[in-house]
Structure formats: C-alpha cells, structure tokens
Image: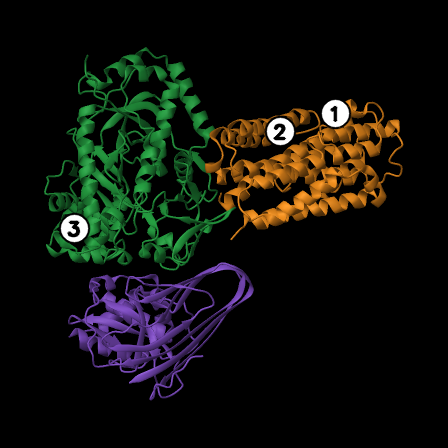
Chain colours: A green, B purple, C orange
Amino acid sequence: MKVRPPGPGHYDEMLLAGNGIREHYRDYGQWLESCDEAWLAQRRQEADLLFHRVGITFTVYGDEQGAERLIPFDALPRIIPAQEWQVLERGLAQRVQALNHFLHDIYHEQHILREGVIPSEQVFTNTQYQLAMQGLDLPHDIYTHIAGIDVIRNNDGRFHVLEDNLRCPSGVSYMLQNRIMMMRLFPELFARYPVAPVAHYPSLLLDTLRHATPVDNPCVVVLTPGRYNSAYYEHAFLAQQMGVELVEGVDLLVKNEHVYMRTTAGLQQVDVIYRRIDDDFLDPLAFRADSSLGVPGLLSVYRKGNVVLANAMGTGIADDKSIYPYVPDMVRFYLSEEPVLENVHTWQCRRPDDLSYVLDNLHELVVKETHGAGGYGMLIGPKATQAEIEEFRARLKAAPHEYIAQPTLSLSSCPTFVEEGVAPRHIDLRPFVLCGRETRIVPGGLTRVALRDGSLVVNSSQGGGTKDTWVLEEVTPC
Amino acid sequence: MKLSISHDTTYAYEGEVSRSTQYIRLTPHSSERQTVFQWTLDLPVDASQLHDAYGNIVHVMTIDHPHDAIAIRARGVVEILPDADEGSDGINPLFFLRETPLTRADESIRDYAALHMQGAARRGLEHLMADLLLRMPYTPGSTHVYETAAESFAKGAGVCQDHTHVFIACCRSQGIPARYVSGYLHTDDDEHLASHAWAEAWVDDHWHTFDVTNGLLVPSHHLKLAIGLDYMEACPVRGVRWGGDNEHLSAQAAVSLAEYPLFTDQ
Amino acid sequence: MLSRIADNLYWMSRYLERAENTVRLLDVTQTVSLMPVGANQDDLNALLEISGLRSGYQSSHHALALPDVLKFFTMDEANPGSIYNCLRMARDNAHAARGKITAEMWESINSTWLDMRLRRTREIGVWNANAFFDWVKERSHLFRGATYGTIMRTDAYQFIRLGTFVERADNSARILSVKFHRIEDYDRPVSVADLYQWTALLRSVGAFEAYQEMYRGEVTPAKVAEMLIFRPDFPRSLRWCLDSIASILVKIRGDAGLAAKRQSAELFARLNYGHMDDVLAVGLPEYLQGLMADIADIGDSIRKGYLEAV
C-alpha cells in the first residue's frame, strides 16, 4: 500500500520532507508496501469485530440513549525511537514530581505563593482548590498517584506538554487493548521490531495503589460512577486486571471512621480507593448534594487518614489551565532544574496585556476555558467562522479570567488508514505516569488521532481514534 | 453573658429508611469570643467526631439498620465575650470570594451591591445591611431551605438564611470575602427563632459580623456553631438516606440566660 | 464478594436460564402444532399460564394464535419475559458484573446479545422458529460451557450457579403444575391422543430420551411426575435443583444466608426422602403449590441474606 505524503511544513512521524522515510519506520514502510490492500482491509475489519465483541466501547456524553460506540482503532502504529522516549520519560517524571511538590506545598506552607511565583488569588479563588485538603498529611506526600500527560510534537519536531491530567486520567485501557489487538493482527511485525511491552501496567498500578497506604496487605478497590459512564469499560478492565473489586458508591458505607464495602459475607474494610469519580461527586454530604455516585461521609474518613484516595482530592488545582502556564516555574522552584519538556506558549486572558493580544488575534489562536476538558468549550481560530469568533470575543470580554489562549499548533501527523488509503492525520500522545515508591512510566501511552483531514481535535468524543504506540527498545548490536 | 441552649431536632419518615448517614454541626468550639462550659449531644447511635475544613466540630453518624425517625438533642452552656477579637483562623480570606450555587450573585444583586457600597468598605457594608432588610423584610415561611440568593432577593422577602446569602453574594460580587455563620441567638422576645444565621465579611484584615436580620454589627448575643461558604456547608444537619419517602422535620431551640450554673442533664 | 455484583451474577444466569426454558416450551408447542392433532388453544393457554404472562398477552392481543404467541415470546419488547428481554437483562447484568466474569464469558453473552438484536430485525414465524430456538439453546450451552471452563471457583461462580438452579426449580415446578392440573388417574397410561402432549412435555424439559431409558415404554402421569420431582440423576428434576441449591449455599462464605441455607436443606431433605405416594396423598396440584411457595421463600432469603445485605 502507498502512503500519501504530508503537506509542506508539517512534521510527520514516518515521512521526511521530500520522499524519505524516517529510520525507525523503514522496516514498517517496506512491510506496508508489500501488503495487499484487501488483506489489510480484512485485518482492520477483524479488529472492529473483536473490539465490539470484547465490548471496548465508550458512552457518548449527551447521548440520551447511552448508546455505546467504538473508538475507532487505527491499525497503523505510532513508533517512537528509544532515544526520543528517554527524553520524554525524563521530562514526564520531572514534571509530575514537580506537580506533586506543588500540591503538597499549596496544601501546606504555600511557599510558592509567598515567594510570588504564582499569584495567591489564582489559587484560592479557583474552585479546584480544595480547602478540605489544607493541612492534611498524605502518605508519602503523594497527591497524584496516576497522571496522564498530554504531549504533542510541534513543527520543529520537539515535544511540548499540552495539558496535565491529574484528576482521573483515562485511556490507559486503550493503550493495553490496542497492543493486544496489534499483536493479534500483525504478529510478524513484532518479530521485526523490538517493541517495549506495556502489559505490566496493571500490576504496576496495583503496586502503586498498595504502596499508597501504610496499611499492611490493604484492601484496594476501584470506584466507578457506574456502567453508564463513558469510561466504565476501563474501570472494569483495570479492576479485573488488578484482581480488585469494582465498586460503586452504593456498595460503600462509612461507619466508625472507616469505609466498608457491602459484601455477601458482611461489611469489609476498604483501605485504598482508586476513584474514577470527580471530587465534586465523592461525598454528597460535603460537596454536591445531588450526587448519587459518591459515598456519604467519605470526606470525614479521608480527613481522619483512614482511607487513601488515588488520586487525592484537590489535585485539580494543579492541572487547571490557569495554573498550567506556571508548571515550568514549578520545576525550577521545587527541583532547581530546568524543565526537560516545554509548555505550549499560553496567554492568560486574566492579564490585561495578554487579553488585548488575544482579542486582536482571535483568528490565529486556540482559546480554551480554564476549567474545560474533553475538547469542549474551545475556539480554534483558524477553523472558526466569523460568528464563532465574535461569540468568543464577547465571552472573553465578559469573563477573561475563565480563558487562556495558545497558538494554533500544527500537531505532528502520522500515516493513518482512511477512506482513500493511507494518509497523514494529526496525533497527540498521552503517557501514564505512576507515582509510588518511585515514579514509573510504562513505555508507551495512548496515541489519539484526529481522523478528519486537517482536524486538530483528537478527543474521542469528537471523532478521534486511537493507535498503538510503539516505544522501541534500544537494541545493542552483538 | 452566659447562655443556656436546648435544641431538639427530630426527623420522621413516612416509610422505612434502610440506612442513612449525617454530618452534624451542632457542637460549638471555644474561641476568644465564646467559652463552652458544658455541651452534650445526644444521638441515636455512636458517632465519630472530627474537625472539618473550617475547623467546625462535625459528628458523622451512620445508622445502618432500618429506622423511621432520627432524634438529635443538643444541650449546653456557653459564655459569650462579644468584645474579644477572634483573630485569624488560618484560612486565606481570598477563599471566601468563591461563589456557590446558593450565593451566586445575579445581575440584579451585582447592581444592587455596587449601588449601595460606595465609599469605605466597612461603612458601605453597614449601609448595605440596613438597606437590605428594608428591601427583604423578615418574613417567616416566605422561602424554602434551598432557596438561592437570587431567588429570595427577587422575592423581596426571606428569613435569616436568605438575608445572609444575599449579603454574602453582594460582598463577593464587590471583591469582599464573606462567609456564612450558623449558630444561636438570644433575644428578649419570642419573635425570632433561636436557631440563627448571620454573615461575616473580611474588611481591614478582620472578620466583621453582619447580622442582617437583626441589624446587629456586634455579635453580643450570638453563639457560633459553624462557618462555611453558605448554608449547605455550615448547616446543623446534612444527611443522605436510602428509602424513607417523605421527611417531616420538627425542631425546637431555646436560648436563655444562664444566670446560675443551673444546667443539668439527666 | 460485593452484594451488588452477586445480585448481577445471580440474575444474569436466572435470565439466561429463563430464556432457555422459554425456548424449550415454545419448541414443543411449535412441534405439536405441526402434528396431525395440532396445537390447540389449551396448549397456548398453558404456555401463557406457565410463564405467568397471560394478562400481559391479553392486554395487547385479541386472539390466541400461534404466530402471535411466538412473536410475543421471542421478539416482543413489551413482554418482560420475551427471549429478547431475557437476553437483554442477562447481558445488562453481565455488563454490570463485568469485572467478575471472564473475558470468554463476557464475549459469549455480549455477542449473543449483538446477534439477538440483529435477529430481531428479521421476521420470525413458524417456518424459521426452530432455527431460532436452536440458536438460543446453543448460546445458552455455550455460555454455560464458557463459565464452566474459565471461571475461578469462587463465590462468583456459586452465585451464577445459584441463579441457574433457582430459576430451573421454579420453572420445572411451573411446568408440572400447569400440565397436571386436570389429571384424574395418575397411573393409567395416557391415551394415544394425549401421548403427544406428554411426550412434548418431556421434550420441553429435555427429558424424553432419559424417560425412555429409565421407564421404558408406557407414559403415565405418575411416572412423569416422579421423574420431574424426585429423580436424583436428572438435571432438571426438582430434587436435583434443590440438591444443587443447598450444596451451593454451603460453599458461600459468611453467615449472611443462614435462612436460605436452612430452608434449602429442609426442602432438599423432603425431596430426597420423599415418595410419589406422599404427593398423591395430598394431591399433586397442592403438593406443587407448596413446592413453589417454598422455592419462592428460598429466593427471598437469598435476596435478603446476600444480594441486598447491609
């Protein structure tokens, strides 16, 4: 099969400008060229069928039917050479370490605020700042046990961090399932390539969670909002892979300063909750009273130190888009190091100078809500109509502090199976960082791909697909 | 002044409740401006006690067997020292600029606050407080417990909870940190319920009392139970239950002068 | 294990078993209809009676005709007992308990459901019903096989089996009580005309061959009843079901289900040491009424003890 070349000025993961192919894709390119188109199509159909049968589906928000859809899987892998991964790995570990320091600091002495690195009001007036966490000591001072860091590659070929996800990052199940699928569809490729394994992620996760409490032989559970949640498949999958209970709020009970689950043999104490429910819904007696997903009284047990939540409450203050611009400063402040990974330049609309620049250049910028997520509530200037731009202009003027703006990035592209054959589509990358005894990152991550030609929105809720991510192991010649 | 408090709350349910959990903020703590001499809280089952994020004393109670009523009884004696300064509680006042669903300022509250708060902050707030009571006369039964500031302000009537919410919304819309206080008030007449709510606003590096309903700026007859961003965070009892259909609440609070240490409990 | 999950697993297998039993009943009714004597109104009524769906059917249908009844029992979304709904509920429960069943089990039940949705888009009638019945039975066997072959023998497995046998016990008792409603002489061999009916009943519980092997020759109501109530080696007899329920309950950890354990052991003892003479002494319909009430009580105790435990 032939691969269509990317447009000029774009960074493509496989193809070089001109007609060349990057070294680490050379074997793959040869293999692909030798493949029969019909055979490949058949393999891809098989993948679809398998995903459906296994039920790897997600629920679309706002879809009243709660219909389950498949996230399109693209059978063409995204390959990352060993040296590039090493840099990424170092940068990710450094960044998450700094973010954990930041969380501990603002919920204790607040050095970073006192020294004026971050303005106090940007923390205290932010709804993601959780007063209930103030002064609370957590085991090993870890706040974000599981982080998903969204990374993109710009025109210049360098990686930038686009977003930190420190609350309930999802997508790791696709990383695992995509690999299983690729090994099943194209076993011969794995003989050609030294692809680093990712299948041990669940056992690393369990180890991280067990380490998160001082309790010996702790009871760990996964707390899900239930099977109508878009990521339910992942919650169930991870619980099963770790061999722990998948619980819903109704299964848990707070009594005598502890959390228990209701089992067929009576109440059983729970020590660590890997929660996939947002802060606001965790305890209807402390936060949103209308939440039926949480556990009444959970906050009281948490404050007593008798249960560990992973991630901790209040981590949202560190991944908020209004705090994001300060992350490189956090690295310098807490670790006295230069950040390995750069941020994407960000204008904070709360600052009058930034705001006026943004308002003057709306047609070129991406504007995001500081609390938004999932690709909702954002303006992509170059793709927006004049009406959309004017609408955002009004919103920005009314509440500038609720927005940030970034340059329109040209995310790197990767060849992808589409209607017309194999063509370049834009991608990002979400590696998962585990913080326990040590910081560990499974070599890989979730590569999301914008399936529409020219689109930069990779979110699954908006027509994005996924790819298997191959991190190559360094092969020492014998 | 020494106050003696007797406060009974009973929840009765039409059907059987299979289990329930409550957060109970019915225990005052001693501070520069109040000394708790004696306090007992009678609950149907054992409860655990802790301090919440604001330093309020909270009892957490779970009843995990079928029940159709919950009775809560608080008794105690507390001395009020109105002239004492409470000092800082360690929470950054900026935190109390945060809006909640119950204290969100809509356009009319924002306009109203801006109009009445010209000049010095303290004087502006006093002026606002006086005007607010005229604008929203104390009217028992005019609002329900989950009424938002915007709703009761539009109605032009309310009870202490509504006055406090609207006042807080005004303050925050003007960039002045403000918080909700739940407690007891001693009055000479029987017109007002003894269970009370008022506001505190952060001005000139201090928390100042604004009891809108009574037009009071000095908490001379006020016993503080709990603080929070709004009613939901400071209210005496907040619970979740499984089953039980309709709930009937009856509450009776009596606050009297404890001239002698007469208080006894059986 | 979690009470909620135990509930899901229990109902997952109850619904699957119900789907299979319904298909067996439909299958014989359909078969009888192809014979010279044909299926009459009584047979169709009996079908509705056994499943307790008579009023549901009557509220949406005027006449009692085989094609309508077929559709009602297979594809009707409004009928809570239709195969379509049984498979939907089974799959929904499996979905909710997904973390506790194996990938093979999930794939089996999920692809059954996906296939069922596809089949529902096609017309069903007397001409193709058999293929559908075979498919349902096959999917049920496949799931049972996947369960047997892949799942750990922990409490999850016990609750799955518990659901199967509680549902089956209930079903066997219902079939008997409807069929034996108007028998006068239990020991007289049935007439040639009735033979088809009795053979059909035996087939509906998959017992025809077994009956032939054990009793050889003539079919009498007493022997059929004995087989379905007391046989220790027939996997759809009430005795077998109760034996299974009682021994499964013993294996479930904890003291939560003492009432269910006691009731099932008592009922099993009555069946284990029971005899047809006792049955005939009180009258079969009365005896079966008692059995059904006892089985319902056991189901209730299982629910209270394990499935909604505080």
Measured along the vertical axis of the image, is residue A447 above or below residue C292?
Answer: above
Which chain is home to disc 3? A
Q: Would you say residue A416 is visible in this rendering?
A: no
Q: Disc 3 residue type?
A: Leu
Q: In percent of the image, x 26 and y 14: which residue is there?
A: A27
Find residue C71 and report its horizontal and vertical position in percent.
67, 34
Which chain is home to disc 2? C
Q: In percent of the image, x 51 and y 53: which residue is there?
A: C310
Q: Nearer the viewer, mark 3 or mark 2?
A: 2
Q: Secondary structure at mark 1?
A: helix
Q: Earlier in the sequence, mark 2 or mark 1?
A: 2
Q: Disc 2 residue type?
A: Val
Q: CA distance from mark 3 to mark 2?
A: 65 Å
Is C151 displayed left or right of C197 in the figure?
left
Q: Identify the residue position indicated by label 3 in the image.
A: A355
Quadrant of the image for the N terminus of chain B? Answer: bottom left
Q: Are marks 3 and 2 in contact (CB under 8 Å)?
A: no
Pick whichever, A131 or A424, lies toward us: A131
Find residue C160 and report its horizontal and vertical position in percent.
57, 37
Q: In percent of the image, x 32 and y 18: which residue is there?
A: A190
How packed is label 3: few (under 14 Cα within 10 Å), some, or many (20 or more)?
many
Tell me the tag on residue C136.
2
How packed is label 2: few (under 14 Cα within 10 Å), some, or many (20 or more)?
many
Tell me the tag on residue C125.
none
Q: Nearer the viewer, mark 2 or mark 1?
A: 1
Q: Disc 1 residue type?
A: Ala
Q: Would you say residue A183 is visible in this rendering?
A: yes
